[in-house]
Amino acid sequence: MVIAVYPGSFDPATYGHLDVIRRASVSFDKIIVGVLHNSAKSPLFSVEERVNILEKVTKDISNVEVKPFEGLSVNFARENHAHVIVRGLRAVTDFEYELQMAQTNRVLAPDIDTVFMTTSLEYAYLSSTIMKEVASFGGDLSKFAPPEIIEAVKWKMHKEK
């Protein structure tokens, strides 16, 4: 069984993230979506909220599991018996950073490979940051994420005001 982890902050998850999850679920026996708790950032959603949201929007994909984690992605991969880390690439600007991380991970854990998946062209522009920016000005989020995520973002942003 080939297990892969797809780590990220997913704050919030977008159609781009879901595109990578769906496509990776076809390529690997099991995908564990790792929701990162990063104490250096101030996320819109708590780790628990992000896990719950991702569980809802991936419930129809039988080989996907969502888990919170802290620390290094390679350690998370090892803890879950994964030998592959999946990373999504939107544009050339992502590649330099992601390549550096993949090479660092390879030094730290030579037994774990990184697989890059380019997001579908229709989501290449999309990021969680862009989605939050548009939401903060009351813009239409329907092209960015499924209704469950949009509702959660609107509720959270309204609550924060």
Image (tube, rainbow, N blue to C red):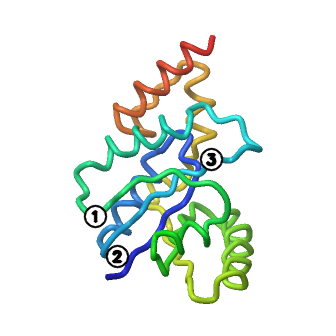
Find disc 1 in the rendering and name its residue.
Answer: 63
Q: Amino acid at mark 1?
A: Asn
Give the mark, 3 or 2, whose residue is nearer the N terminus: 2
Structural crowding at the residue carrying mark 3, measured as other residues with C-alpha within 10 Å and reported as few (<14), some (14–19) or many (≥20) = some
Give the mark, 3 or 1, whose residue is nearer the N terminus: 3
Image coords of residue 71 (percent x, y): 67, 59
Image coords of residue 96 (percent x, y): 73, 71
| Disc 1 to disc 2: CB gap under 8 Å | yes
Find disc 3 in the rendering and name its residue.
Answer: 37
Residue at 33% across, 70% down: 30
In the displayed structure, 27 sits above or below 63; it is below
Q: Amino acid at mark 2?
A: Phe
Kindly indicate the quadrant of the structure image that contains residue 160.
Answer: top right
In the displayed structure, 132 sits above or below 110; it is above
Structural crowding at the residue carrying mark 2, measured as other residues with C-alpha within 10 Å and reported as few (<14), some (14–19) or many (≥20) = some
Q: Alpha carbon of mark 3 to alpha carbon of mark 2: how far?
A: 25 Å
Labels 3, 2: front one: 3
Structural crowding at the residue carrying mark 1, measured as other residues with C-alpha within 10 Å and reported as few (<14), some (14–19) or many (≥20) = some
Q: Secondary structure at mark 1?
A: loop
Q: Alpha carbon of mark 3 to alpha carbon of mark 1: how far?
A: 23 Å
Find disc 2 in the rendering and name its residue.
Answer: 28
| Disc 3 to disc 2: CB gap under 8 Å | no
| Disc 3 to disc 1: CB gap under 8 Å | no
